[in-house]
Amino acid sequence: MKKGNCHMLRIAICDDEENARDNLRIQLEKIIDETDNEIVYEFSNGHTCVNWLAAHPGEVDLLFLDVEMGAENGMDAAKKIRTFDQSLQIVFVTGYTDYVFDGYQVNALDYLIKPASLQKLKEVLLRAENIFSSQAEKFFVLKNSDGIYRLSYQDILYFFSDRRCIHLVTAAKTYTFYGKLNDIEEQVQKNFIRIHQRYLVNSDKVTFLGNNFVTVDNPACEKLPVSRACRKDAAEKLAKSLLRLL
């Protein structure tokens, strides 16, 4: 893993034992010291981990999750995480060599026996990087003052510009970063359609096409403006998209 890797991993650790978290962090730091990967969060229980991840989509790429925790074990936490995040890579960590669990149910990347060896951790990190590299076209990556986010295109509702800022809107959260909407339009998948000088919408998320507005599939059923200049082209593309979904 070379420094400057564009598929930088943001890593989190969840374990209810402080010593176990410390040991894993120290081992990981030995590996990632010469890479762009970083450990960004640590959690002491599954409940807190699940709630935080649900409220902060796209902020963690790889989660090391202890199997044996208190009220909510790692498998329970992983099942809940999968209800709102399919792309997060999960690696189970266990203290028992004979512990058997159905990691395939939650599409786990791997499981490690405590204490994890440097070689095994290197292999896991490389596999995670390769997965994100191979799926790069499925994600939009942005950077702002808070950090770097990797968001699945299927979770993005729309982009809109405000002066020099771009706002990326999902059902859960809005992310703001510097950029130009024209550049975003060239970068994103073809199902994103320009409906206005300031709006670029995910056609798969459009639920209604009106004369001068569209609604998108989120709890607020937001209305987004369709400008006169974009109306004809946008209407044709959106109509095809809506018919395809029937």
Image (spheres, rainbow, N blue to C red):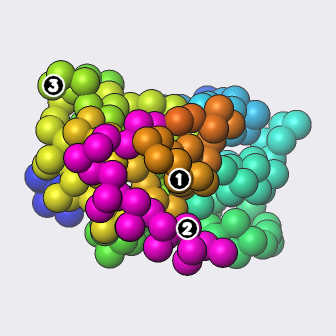
Between label 2 and label 1, give the one nearer the viewer. 1
Instruction: Find residue 39 and report its image quarter.
Output: top left
Please name whichever residue, 155 or 21, is drawn nearer the observer in this view of the structure: 155
Residue 24 visible in the displayed image: no
Residue 97, quarter of picture: bottom right
Label 2, residues with CA under 10 Å away: few <14, some 14-19, many ≥20:
some
Describe the element under mark 2 as helix, strand or loop: helix
Mark 1 element type: strand
Badge 1: few (under 14), some or many (20 or more) residues near its Cα, within 10 Å? some
What amino acid type is highlighted by mark number 1? Leu
Q: Position of residue 179 (x, y in %)?
A: 16, 35
Q: Amino acid at mark 3?
A: Arg
Q: Where in the figure is residue 83, as x and y percent of width and height?
A: 72, 54
Residue range in magenta is: 224-246
Determine which residue is flagged by label 2: 242
Q: Would residue 216 be found to the left or right of residue 123 on screen?
A: right
Find numbered disc 3 in the image and state the secondary structure of the residue it sits on. loop
Q: Which residue is the site of mark 1?
A: 209
Which residue lies under the disc numbered 3? Answer: 164
